Image (cartoon, rainbow, N blue to C red):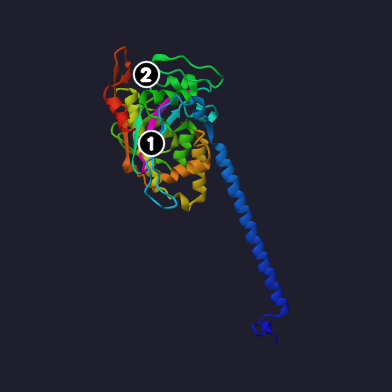
Amino acid sequence: MTGLEEHGETGSGAGRRSRALKAAGLTLAAVLVVGVGTAGWAYWHLNGNIKSVDIDNALGDDRPAKAVTTPSASASAAPPPTEAVNLLVLGSDSRSGAANQALGGGDSTGARSDTAMVVHIDAGRTTATVVSIPRDTLVTRPSCPLPEGGSTATAYGAMFNTAYAVGGPVCAVKTVESITGIRMDHYVEVDFSGFAKLVDALGGVTVTTDEDIDDDDSHLHLAAGTHRLDGARALALARTRHGIGDGSDLGRIGLQQKLVKALLEQIASTDLLTSPARLYEVADAVTGSLTTDTGLDSLAELTELGRSLKGLSAGNVRTVTMPVVPAPSDPNRVVALEPAASALWKSLK
């Protein structure tokens, strides 16, 4: 009797086992190939979602200086970031496509930046300050280069959100840098439908309102209290202004800041790594809604920024509004309150 026969395996049985192992190996290899191919397609798709604008090239050297890098004392292979980072985050109310228009976006010929936030993240990436700039603020809008050549004229006493309308992201960044004296390291623009899709992909967001909201313009009607909002209603909350307070943009900014905190908390409490399908849905919603500068226009660059923020919790994010007062020339507009506004921007340098 052979060794195989001692263990109950005849020659033909061993052959069947060998063929079964070979088939299993081929099946596993096929699954791995398909998995790698799917991952590759997903990466290609998500990477292709992101739109970008070359702001650095457009503005050249006529900008505030970059933040000074602090030497790192760490000898580890991946030392912590050593410089603060500043991002200009805009919410655009007008992007082409039926999805945006169904949610209240304007037509594709007239874009406005309804939401503007300067996000300052400290060098250790453990605290952040989010400063909202009221869209109705009267500012000196600097001359901005245009994509087709030439430039816009300097405008005095112009509404802040006209910078985006006349010169797109480049002029928005230049205007913010002119107001703040701070260089914007990155630019991030989020459109209507993308914001709503992100909230839905996260399973909604929980927000507590301090007063009843009754706004026919944003189609939002909420009693004071805690509410779980889907994407459409979260977007309506971000756009609400006439149904709260004095109906000014300052009331809307307060709601937007609540949403920022609520979204951070929702993301932190959602274990995306245990659900690849949901992780992809969230990533697709995020990348599909973004226009960035060329320094953040790839999945790898966005992921690197995200990883650097792993120590940042919602509780360490401070939200404030640029100090303003009613404009002497128009009570429906505001101007920066000095010296408080300058002191705020100086504290972030």
On the question of residue 202 being in view, the answer is: no
* In the foreground, 43 or 7: 43
x, y percentage for residue 222? 34, 33
Q: Amino acid at mark 2?
A: Val
Q: Nearer the viewer, mark 2 or mark 1?
A: 1
Crowding at dot 2, Cα within 10 Å, few <14 / some 14-19 / many 20+, comes out as many
Q: Amino acid at mark 1?
A: Val
Residue 139 has which mark? 2
- Could you tell me which secondary element the residue under label 2 belongs to? strand
* In the foreground, 87 or 185: 185
Total marks in image: 2
- Discs 2, 1 touching: Cβ within 8 Å: no
The magenta segment is 111-125
* In the foreground, 28 or 137: 137
The answer to whether 91 appears left or right of 288 in the picture is: left
> Where is the C terminus found, in terms of image quarters?
top left
At 70% from the left and 80% from the top, the residue drawn is 10
Which of the 4 quarters of the picture holds residue 328? Answer: top left
Crowding at dot 1, Cα within 10 Å, few <14 / some 14-19 / many 20+, comes out as few
On the question of residue 56 being in view, the answer is: yes
Q: Is residue 64 magenta?
A: no
The answer to whether 5 appears left or right of 60 in the picture is: right
Residue 68 has which mark? 1
The answer to whether 86 appears left or right of 25 in the picture is: left
At 57% from the left and 45% from the top, the residue drawn is 42
x, y percentage for residue 125? 37, 43
Q: Which SS does the magenta portion mostly show?
A: strand
* In the foreground, 143 or 207: 143
